[in-house]
Amino acid sequence: MTHPFEIELTTSLPASPEQVWEAIATGPGIDSWFMGRNELDPREGGTAAMETGGHRAEAVITAYEPGKRLATRTATAEDGRFMAFEYLIEGRDGGATVLRVVHSGLLGDDWQDEYDALRRGWPFHLHTLREYLTHFTGRTAVPVFAAAPSAGRPDPELRTALADALSLSLPVTVGARAHAEPAGLPPLDGEVVWADDERLGIRTADGLYTFHHGQGLALMFHHLFGPATDGAEAAWQRWLTGLLV
């Protein structure tokens, strides 16, 4: 049985409406703060697509008003499920912008767990958008994704392994310094900008790094702005897999 849901969030961003629009309504912009590799056909009736770990999800653009409003909706599944997204932009004095995000639709039988995951995830994503617009505006990132099973480790043990690999002490706190040396890549040296029970967010001079764990998986969603991106996804996948062996 399906269940309707709606999540609405509003945030103030240190960027102009044009910069926010570029971040939420273009493929390279979305790549720089959200998940996966993204494509967007800039017109009402066009397609917005995201590819993550070999899985491609598509939605139809139902509203396209540059600098003001973007809305998308996935196709309705056989059981009635679908998701809709709406982004509303409003400029403020001093070069700031208010962004309102509405995520709605119908969820399936396990709707409560899925809803809780979405509700917890959106504040983190909007925080990453703020980090991007504050520190990397005008630049575009190479997205990096990696995933590995947790080899039966419970979440607290997995979090400990991630913290140790990033030279962090538990409990991890915002402002702590992180360091890692994935083989074949420059060292990661940065600051923790987000820490909760599921995610760690780290900002370096040339990237935004996300480490996510739960439900038997460890995931990474990174956004790399520096020149050394060739082979980065494979290198981070080896790092994550080696960590969980």
Image (cartoon, grey):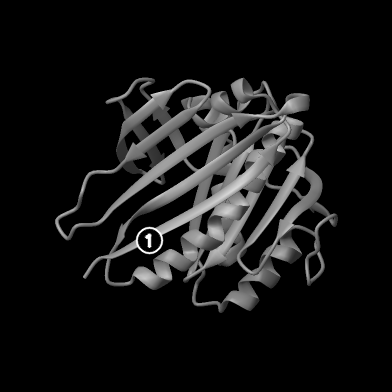
Q: Residue at x 40, y 65 (%)?
A: 114
Reading the image, the residue beneath label 1 is: 5
Residue 239 visible? The answer is no
Q: Residues within 10 Å of mark 1 (few under 14, many from 20)?
A: some
The quarter in which the N terminus is drawn is bottom left
Question: Visible in this render: residue 14?
Answer: yes
Amino acid at dot 1: Phe
Q: Which quadrant of the figure has residue 3?
A: bottom left
Residue at far front of view: 93
Q: Position of residue 209 (x, y in %)?
A: 66, 46
* Residue in the foreground of this view, choosing between 15 and 143: 15
Relative to 117, 105 lies left or right:
left
Q: Is residue 213 left or right of residue 62?
A: right
Q: Count how many numbered circles sit on residues in the image.
A: 1
Q: Residue furthest left?
A: 78
Q: Residue at x 63, y 23 (%)?
A: 19
The residue drawn where x is 47% and y is 59% is 118
Q: Is residue 210 depicted above or below 24 in this figure? A: below
Identify whether 28 is placed above or below 53.
Answer: above
In the picture shown, does residue 153 fall above or below 87?
below
**Residue 115 located left or right of residue 233:** left
Q: Quadrant of residue 38?
A: top left
* Up-down relation of residue 235 to residue 23 (above or below): below
